[in-house]
Amino acid sequence: MSLAAAMAPATSSMAHAEDLRFDLANNTSVALVELFMSPTDVDNWEEDVLGSEVLMPGETAAVTVADGRRNCVYDILGVFADDDEVEDYGIDLCELAAYEFYEK
């Protein structure tokens, strides 16, 4: 299966906010089991944002990144139950209202 990601712009900018908030949608047919997010200047993936949660197909969840950084631009790695992975780089979360995983 081929998976991808898309973003939706926010109606108001949250530039330089410490806590970033956006809606995460899983519009695929496979559960999203891990979501890793790291600032673009960090070389390794940081902790799984979902923790023990799973985002089932068709579900949307509010995500808050409360890492204390004043950073807006993150790299994202989504891992699905079938072991497919989607990586996306340089995403400006301060400008987003939503981030979506979908099937191509």
Image (tube, rainbow, N blue to C red):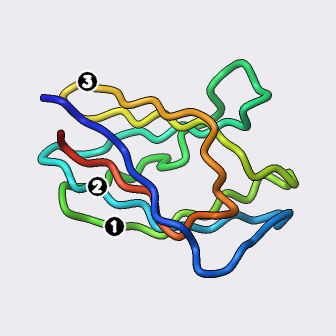
In this view, the residue in front, 43 or 90, is 90
Identify which residue is drawn at 12% across, 47% down.
29
Residue closest to the far top: 43
Q: Quadrant of residue 43?
A: top right
- Residue 26 is left or right of residue 23, and the answer is left
Look at mark 2 in the image and give the residue it sits on: 26
Identify which residue is drawn at 60% across, 45% down.
91
**Image: 79 above or below 68:** above
Q: Quadrant of the C terminus?
A: top left
**Label 3 to label 2, Cα distance in Å?**
15 Å
**Image: 53 above or below 97:** above
Q: Quadrant of residue 56?
A: bottom left
- Residue 70 is left or right of residue 97, and the answer is right
In this view, the residue in front, 49 or 91, is 91
Q: Secondary structure at mark 1?
A: strand
Look at mark 3 in the image and give the residue it sits on: 83
Q: Position of residue 57 (x, y in %)?
A: 18, 55
Give the residue type that dot 2 points to.
Answer: Asn
Circle 1/circle 2 CB separation < 8 Å? yes
Q: Position of residue 68 (x, y in %)?
A: 85, 55
- Residue 27 is left or right of residue 42, and the answer is left
Q: Secondary structure at mark 3?
A: loop
Q: Residues within 10 Å of mark 3 (few under 14, many from 20)?
A: few
Question: Which callout, 3 or 2, points at the residue further toward the start of the chain?
Answer: 2
Q: Residues within 10 Å of mark 1 (few under 14, many from 20)?
A: some
